Amino acid sequence: MSERIALYAGSFDPPTLGHLDLIVRAVKIFDKVIVCVACNDQKVGMFTTKERMEMLKEMTSDLPSVTIQQFCGLTVEYARQQGAIALIRGLRAISDFEFELSMAINNQKLNSHVDTVCLMPSEPYLFLSSRQVKEIVRFGGSVSHYVTPAVEKHLTRKLKSVD
């Protein structure tokens, strides 16, 4: 039987405990999980791709079946190149469902061999987003319950360098 590989793509700007929650749960389902920092020319990131990859590597260092990569282009095409059978997506709310359903249908048309697997976040992360984390830090709030200590240090350092 071949290795069951899943791809979890996102901007991860910054990676949160909600992202980690989905990664840990995906590891229980698949033999290997490739976490991909995607290029998105429609989003201006706070962190460089390299910084996001470093933070994800720190967060997943105790998960040997997880690899961190970067890519540009169609996620479903990159999944095919990596031998993945599934795309991992998180569903936080009804609004996520409509977007994710549309993407899943398009991805299925592009590559019928790759399925979309949607995971609901654990309760503490239901309404967590990277955008909210950045906003809380910008206004001096603590995000220790939303990100790892290492990510919080990166956020604080980055925001101090912007001021």
Image: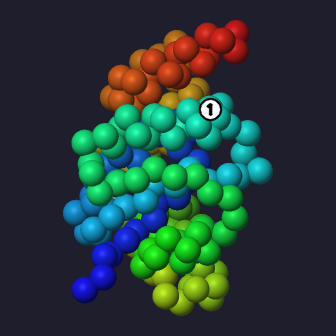
Provide residue 36's location: percent of width, then percent of height. 52, 55
Provide residue 49's location: percent of width, then percent of height. 62, 40
Quarter of the image where one finds residue 125 = top left
The residue nearer to you, when weighing 77 against 20, is: 77
> From the viewer's perspective, is residue 151 above or below residue 87?
above
- Answer few, some or many: residues within 10 Å of disc 1's Cα (few below 14, many 20 plus, some between 14 and 19): some
Quarter of the image where one finds residue 1 = bottom left
> From the viewer's perspective, is residue 20 above or below residue 158?
below
Q: Residue furthest right?
A: 41
Q: Is residue 93 left or right of residue 38?
A: left
> From the viewer's perspective, is residue 31 above or below residue 49?
below
Q: Is residue 13 left or right of residue 126?
A: right
Q: Residue at x 27, y 48 (%)?
A: 63
Q: Is residue 123 left or right of residue 35?
A: left
Q: Residue at x 45, y 65 (%)?
A: 7
The residue nearer to you, when weighing 1 against 159, is: 1
Secondary structure of the residue carrying tag 1 is: loop
Q: Of the residues shown, which amino acid type is indicated by label 1?
A: Phe
The residue nearer to you, when weighing 103 against 12, is: 12
Q: Say whether residue 131 is visible.
A: no
In what quadrant of the picture does the C terminus appear? top right
> From the viewer's perspective, is residue 50 above or below residue 8?
above
What colour-coding does the image apply? rainbow
Q: Say whether residue 84 is visible.
A: yes
Q: Residue at x 68, y 52 (%)?
A: 39
Quarter of the image where one finds residue 88 = bottom left
Provide residue 64's location: percent of width, then percent of height. 27, 51
Q: Is residue 135 left or right of residue 141?
A: right
Provide residue 134's location: percent of width, then percent of height. 56, 28
- Which residue is identified by label 1? 47
How many numbered marks appear? 1
